[in-house]
Image (cartoon, rainbow, N blue to C red):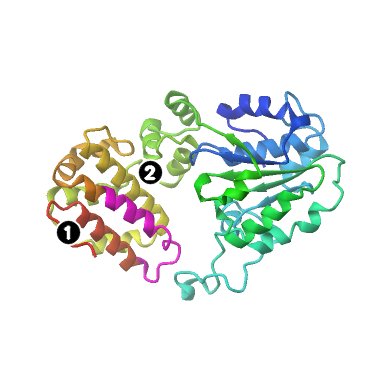
Amino acid sequence: MNLHAYPWHTALASEWLSHRERFAHAWLIHGMPGIGKTQFALAAAAALLCESPEDGLACGRCLACGWLTKGNHPDLRRIRPDAIAAEEGAADEEMSSASEDAPVAADPSATGKKSLSREIRIEQIRAVENWFNQATHRAGYRVALIYPAESLNVVSANALLKVLEEPAPHTVFLLVTDAMDRLMPTLISRCRKLPLSGPSREASMTWLASQGVKDPAGWLSASGGAPVHALKMSQQSSIPCPDWLQSFVSNLSTQHNRDMGTLAESLAKSPATVWLDTLQRLSVDLSLLAHGLPLRYYPALQELLQPVAARAQPSRLSELGSWINAQRRIAQHPLTPKLFCQAALDRFAAYCAATHASVD
């Protein structure tokens, strides 16, 4: 566990945590995705548990910091979906077991087991109720880190709400969210809000370059200006604008070769959320270009996108963005990934057509 926030959040963390004697029992840390909110919350938890904080931040040398670095401090609990815990490399015993009614994987025959939940379930809240009522191990704070908070379902959110209404002494809840509008208003009302912003574009590119990222400007654009997300993207792909996207936009531009079967077969091998995110960014760029505004995500595609934006109806591009958002709700478990992908590509092309083709 890294005990420090990203450089652009260090000053805020120090100022905020220096007033812990007036600390609220629940904080809602919010801001745009990919700017380091979860790491900020982890650094805050480390500072609260540290036995010799310096300028409000974790010292990195005390016994508590040693436990945190190894990821086994008994007064810290991370409450997040099992799928995220697995992505973070959590040990099996750290993850709550999948419930019996968890959805099966898209291809159960390929995995032979149920998929991990992407929700924070009520069992996870109940599992820490006894922990709330125990004495802390070092006579200090107890910290519950909940992320992403929008992963709470209705039942688990209500269970957490009851806990927040009668908090245990010396317990601090840190909730992290990308989408505050997806949280229950009553849950929001029980928390103090702490908004986080990202660094400037120049500072982001400098930081990305220091991390060894080539073409930091391109990756930063592709991530929508979120440096942490840009770094992760650069570690998962070789170029900011993937080859398949350039091929797809070329087809849209020339209105030739509209059969998306081969491309869909290739894309279906990656998670649907990945290519849907890319299509969503592309739809935003098209809408911006249609209104005479500069591209946000893929400036390298401007020449190819120009004729597409010129013939597409702005209202239809707006409908396209809404349609892609709706697909995200079923993206985790498409029954047939290839058909799901091909249908999405065909639908995208239909929305960009000059004529009012049916997209039903």
Report the magenta residues as a range.
318-337
User: Can I make out residue 148 in this image?
Assistant: no
Q: Is residue 159 above or below residue 209?
A: below
Which x, y percent locates residue 84? 57, 54
User: Can I make out residue 200 in this image?
Assistant: yes
Assign the C terminus to one quadrant of the image. bottom left
- Direction from residue 63 to residue 208 in the image, left or right: left
Q: Which residue is drawn at 73% across and 61% down?
A: 127
Crowdedness near tag 1: few (<14), some (14–19) or many (≥20) residues, C-alpha within 10 Å: some
Q: Which residue is drawn at 55% across and 72% down?
A: 113
Q: Name the residue under label 1.
A: 258
- Camera-side residue of 116 and 192: 192
Assign the N terminus to one quadrant of the image. top right
Amino acid on which the number 2 mark rests in the picture: Ser
Amino acid on which the number 1 mark rests in the picture: Arg
The verdict on residue 327 being magenta is yes
- Direction from residue 135 to residue 274 in the image, left or right: left
Q: Earlier in the sequence, mark 1 or mark 2?
A: 2
